[in-house]
Amino acid sequence: MKSLLPFLLLALSAGTVSAAPQTHQLPRPDGTIIHYLLDAPQRESTGLLVLAQGSGCRPASGSANLATIRAAFPAYTALIVEKSGIAPGDPIENGYDDCPVEFLDTYTLSSRILDYERVLAHLQPASEPPLPIVLFGGSEGGLAMERLAARIHPAAAILLSGSVGGTFGEMVLSTVPPEGQTTVSAGFAEARANPDSSAMLSGHTFRFWADSLDHRSSDYLEATDTPFLLIYGGRDTAPVRSVRILANRFAEQGRCNLTYWEFPALDHGMADPKGQSRMADVARLAAAWAEQPLPAC
């Protein structure tokens, strides 16, 4: 497989974006509040960039990685929707063992998708004609954007180090050392048997795991003709073999809406062996692809 690292040197400057993103609130049907952030460009917007962070409960609006990705799309309005129970500026440090009770009691992947749909439905009538939507999600956020893409059929979707190929549970288990897999598998089985439980397993409730474990990314990728860009690091702790198999299967079936980039020297967070982040370079390349997604075959 041809390395894409040399092309990083060709990435374009990202330009400037608005310095004053705006926070907003939207009520859910049960009266609880969705917190979201909109960051519009200084000039006329050419699209809506939906950004989704990975696991944990730290406010997405304060994510350095999402800010880096946002900077690569200066002509877009960026949208960040916080997870349930989370508001911008919440004083959460670790994001795993210091999550607020409201987050633990309410957050699932399915509820996250519903929140995105509610916010998008609220925003789109204000844009005539509606702006083209580009989804960009990393890790757990990649799975969220896959599911959302299958429901709203955006102009493009970019998935960074997500769970592509097998189920979410299989991906998580693949990152666990062999000596711990029996224990984790038993925990997954207990979560399936108690899907409404607030008991904790690896930083999430049984409720979260029961909702997420059996979601298979390929089902969502195959449910839409949306152009997808999958980006993986060859040093990711989650094996990339399943992603390669999926990309090859799409090609063999003549499905041309999936492009796969693999950076052999980068890890799950797009850092090189020296620990230097290459996220900005990768994001600029992805932004260039999103401007005119080329068929993969």
Image: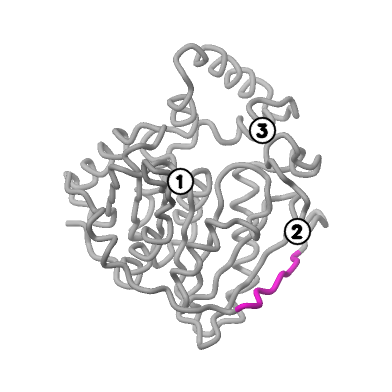
Secondary element under disc 3, as helix, strand or loop, is strand
Residue at mark 1: 269
Give x and y (percent) for residue 18.
Answer: 58, 79
Residue at mark 3: 204
Q: Give the camera-side residue of 115 and 75.
A: 75
Q: Are marks 2 and 1 in contact (CB under 8 Å)?
A: no
Q: Give the camera-side residue of 149 and 1.
A: 1
Give x and y (percent) for residue 266.
Answer: 35, 44
Q: How many marks?
A: 3
Give the quadrant of residue 40.
bottom right
Quadrant in which the N terminus is drawn: top left
Of pointers 3 and 2, the one earlier in the residue sequence: 2
133 vs 104: above or below? below
Colour scheme of this structure image?
one colour
Of pointers 3 and 1, the one earlier in the residue sequence: 3
- Please, what is the three-letter code of the amino acid marked with disc 2? Gly
Q: Are marks 3 and 2 in contact (CB under 8 Å)?
A: no
Q: Which residues are magenta?
A: 19-26
Which callout, 3 or 2, points to the residue nearer the camera?
Answer: 2
Quadrant in which the C terminus is drawn: bottom left
Q: Give the camera-side residue of 200 and 215.
A: 200
Q: Are marks 3 and 1 in contact (CB under 8 Å)?
A: no
Identified at 53% across, 85% down, the residue is: 128
Q: Give the camera-side residue of 269 and 107.
A: 269
Task: Point out the residue furthest to the front here.
Answer: 274
Residue at mark 2: 89
Q: Is residue 70 left or right of residue 4?
A: right
Give x and y (percent) for residue 190.
Answer: 63, 18
Task: Assess disc 1: are there few (<14), some (14-19) or many (≥20) residues with their C-alpha within 10 Å of its C-alpha.
Answer: some
